[in-house]
Amino acid sequence: MWLLYLFGCRRITYNTTTRSKATFRRKGSMLTFAFVLVGSYLLGSIPFGCLAGRIRGIDIRKVGSGNIGATNVVRVLGKRYGYPVFVLDFLKGLGAVRIAMAVRPESTSPELVGVLAAVSAVIGHSFPIWLKFRGGKGVATSAGALFGLMPLATVIGAAIWILTFLLTRYVSVASVATAVALPFVIAIMTWLNQTDGKTLFYSSLCLAAVIIWRHHSNLSRLVRGTEPRFTRK
């Protein structure tokens, strides 16, 4: 606000330039958030498992478990195709988080932007628009996204996954157990570091919910005793 004297009378005018800059920053932040949400979803929706099947001349959705994730690709096509699919799905999550943090406005928390990108990428992987919203289970993409946000927690989660898998030989059990354990791991690490990790904790709960929901058919087969143990070609 500025004070002007005109013909001996004091008049009040407003600094419209400052208000315009604030409005511009808000619009820029909204556009950035929209870019992060849509861009991360589209990056996560790239169906590398489906593309691997096409390279071999098959529709991966019609063989094995019908899932486009790395586990089914390993079972059907072997580790030559399955391992690269896992790495690429992992990089989708990691890339979404890193790109979002790089383009965020300076006034925005990098953690918040990274979390939005992580959840969007996993939703994109699990519900890709290109495949009529029938995608993978979201494990590899979640791992990549969490690695971009909290690397040590992801390493601990990987150790939990490997141990559970070696004990049970069920990929689904290892994935669900890790999804359930990670929020507790993040909560303990946050408490030990005496830092505010509420955003990361709640985001890990969201990712765990997506993973568990995507494994509901596996859990049903486990209850019936018909879930196959992992064997690879």
Image (cartoon, grey):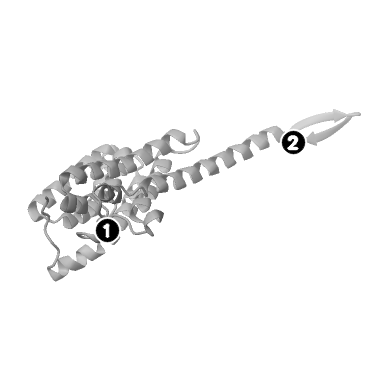
Q: Is residue 190 visible?
A: no
Q: Quadrant of residue 91?
A: top left
Residue at the location (41% across, 45% down)?
40
Q: Which residue is mark 2?
A: 14
Say which amino acid is labelled 2: Tyr
Task: Classify 134 as above or below 102.
Answer: below
Q: Is residue 120 visible?
A: yes
Task: Classify 164 as above or below 26.
Answer: below
Residue at the location (23% across, 41% down)?
84
| Nearer the observer, 75 or 26 | 75
Instruction: State the image coordinates of residue 24 (x, y, percent, origin top left).
Output: 62, 38
Instruction: State the image coordinates of residue 106 (x, y, percent, origin top left).
Output: 49, 33
Residue at the location (21% across, 40% down)?
155
For label 2, the SS is: loop
Image quadrant holding the N terminus, namely top right
Residue 42 lies left or right of residue 140; in this view the side is: right
Instruction: State the image coordinates of residue 198 (x, y, percent, origin top left).
Output: 36, 47
- Identity of the residue furthest to the front in this view: 57
Residue at the location (39% across, 40% down)?
111
| Nearer the observer, 124 or 101 | 124
Q: Which residue is mark 1?
A: 61
Task: Classify 24 as above or below 136.
Answer: above
For label 1, the SS is: helix
Residue 183 lies left or right of residue 161; in this view the side is: right
Residue 54 lies left or right of residue 177; in this view the side is: right
